[in-house]
């Protein structure tokens, strides 16, 4: 049977429409401006690699290019009624989150062979605290096989205007630019390690160092979707955000998340300057946590459990309480054995995605009100005897400091 083509003429027409709509949306809603333009030549194959800051990044990046970019995206967004539209009409390529996906690689290879260009966010995750997620050697090895033009693209300001922990936007500087262009004759001379280091160095962006202000009266709200332990009293699940501040309901610690994306407090015991410091403190708390047999570690109420398999309708399975013990992830009367949990990740900062067997599940609360922190579960999965920990499937939410 002849393989189905990935690069279609209709994609050029659809791309022009999406680009025009995206330009208006990202300019008006996000204040985004692209500094650079790149004209993809006829017959040229391009791989655009970008850092990842907001859910709207693909629509921002395409504004710099004249031809379709086939975006690689996490496969859960292909569930539901729009999955086939994303794949068939826009040409987007689904990828299993957090692990190597051979089917995704094969689709990318087909696009390149047919003369198409690809947009990839190699970290596979939106930034939380400005560190860089894992990028493996397999990326540059794949590029060398493709022998394509590589464009390293920077997004600046996304962590300020649309932080991952919040669904509310902040006003401020948000722009995109081409950081570096590399051609095969250049990177073929490099070792894989040298090539990868160039990619990583050029994709690093720290918005807390850019000198711009991000003005908002609600800048810190929903920070407890990311942070979950008070560094003063060491208590878990006592943090609450309001306005520009994060509070501990146990010891009274008050921390301001200021307009330059730095942390400040009048409490002399508080030493963290940036979110990354607190992020690493929470990881240490997980590493030091003493697990007791059959004892509940975490629990969250008013949650939904949904199946999110690619190209299938989403299905609500249960509503109620989510809890975690040393052996099970439990949703009301449904028990998932941790020994069978293959991979888990966070989506948009407020939803937990995990895979058991052939089924992918999502746990979420009210998108606009829930203070649910999915990150703590994923980090704890990398401490407990889950399949993802035993087989080292997760390179992204490891317990090592970033």
Image (tube, rainbow, N blue to C red):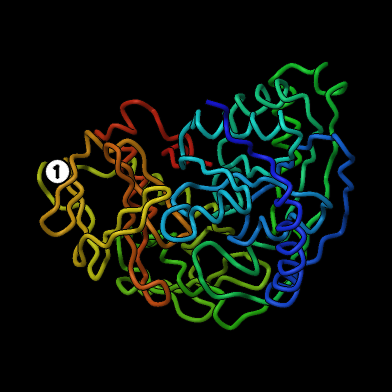
> Can you give x and y, in whole percent of width and height, for residue 363 in the image?
31, 58
> For the point 77% across and 41% down, which residue is it?
152
x, y percentage for residue 135? 60, 34
The part of the image, by quadrant, that contains residue 58 is: bottom right
Q: Would you say 373 lies left or right of 63 here?
A: left
Give the quarter of the image for residue 170. bottom right
> Residue 43, how many percent across, how many down?
85, 34
Residue 234 appears in view: yes
Residue 343 is left or right of residue 401, and the answer is left
> Quadrant of the rendered structure where residue 80 is?
bottom left
Residue in the picture at 51% in, 71% down = 167
193 vs 213, nearest the viewer? 193
Few, some or many C-alpha atoms within 10 Å of disc 1 (few <14, some 14-19, many ≥20)? few
Residue at the image position 45 percent from the left and 55 percent from the top: 347
Q: Residue at x 79, y 59 (%)?
A: 63
Is label 1 in a helix, a strand or a loop? loop
So how many labels did they put on this image?
A: 1
Residue in the foreground of this view, choosing between 344 and 257: 344
Give the residue pinned by disc 1.
292
Give the residue furthest to the front.
1
Where 4 sits versus 333, above or below? above
Residue 173 shows in this picture: no
- Specify whether 367 is left or right of 89: left
Estimate the x, y position of residue 339 in percent, counting from the top left: 22, 33
């Amino acid at each position: 049977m002849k393989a189905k083509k990935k690069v279609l003429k209709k994609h050029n027409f659809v791309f022009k429409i999406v680009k025009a709509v995206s330009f208006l949306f990202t300019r008006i809603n996000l204040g985004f401006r692209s500094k650079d333009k790149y004209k993809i030549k006829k017959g040229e194959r391009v791989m655009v690699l970008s850092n990842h800051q907001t859910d709207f990044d693909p629509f921002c990046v395409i504004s710099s290019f004249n031809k379709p970019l086939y975006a690689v995206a996490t496969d859960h967004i292909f569930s539901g009624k729009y999955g086939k539209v994303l794949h068939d009409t826009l040409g987007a390529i689904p990828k299993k989150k957090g692990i190597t996906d051979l089917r995704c690689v094969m689709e990318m290879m087909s696009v390149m062979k047919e003369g198409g260009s690809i947009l990839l966010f190699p970290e596979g995750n939106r930034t939380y605290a400005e560190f860089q997620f894992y990028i493996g050697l397999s990326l540059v090895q794949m590029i060398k096989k493709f022998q394509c033009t590589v464009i390293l693209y920077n997004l600046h300001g996304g962590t300020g205007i649309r932080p991952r922990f919040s669904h509310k936007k902040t006003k401020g500087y948000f722009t995109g630019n081409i950081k570096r262009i590399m051609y095969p004759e250049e990177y073929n001379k490099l070792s894989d390690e040298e090539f990868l280091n160039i990619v990583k160095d050029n994709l690093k962006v720290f918005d807390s160092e850019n000198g711009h202000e991000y003005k908002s009266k609600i800048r810190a709200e929903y920070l407890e979707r990311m942070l979950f332990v008070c560094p003063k009293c060491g208590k878990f699940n006592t943090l609450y955000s309001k306005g520009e501040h994060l509070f501990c309901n146990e010891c009274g610690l008050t921390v301001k998340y200021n307009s330059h994306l730095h942390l400040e407090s009048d409490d002399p015991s508080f030493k963290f300057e940036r979110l990354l410091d607190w992020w690493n403190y929470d990881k240490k708390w997980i590493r030091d946590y003493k697990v007791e047999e059959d004892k509940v570690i975490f629990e969250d109420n008013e949650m939904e459990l949904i199946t999110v398999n690619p190209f299938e309708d989403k299905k609500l399975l249960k509503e109620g309480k989510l809890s975690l013990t040393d052996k099970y992830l439990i949703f009301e009367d449904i028990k998932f054995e941790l020994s069978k949990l293959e991979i888990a990740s966070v989506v948009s900062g407020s939803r937990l995605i995990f895979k058991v067997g052939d089924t992918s599940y999502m746990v979420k609360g009210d998108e606009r009100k829930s203070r649910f922190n999915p990150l703590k579960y994923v980090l704890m999965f990398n401490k407990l005897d889950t399949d993802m920990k035993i087989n080292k499937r997760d390179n992204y939410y490891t317990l090592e400091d970033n």
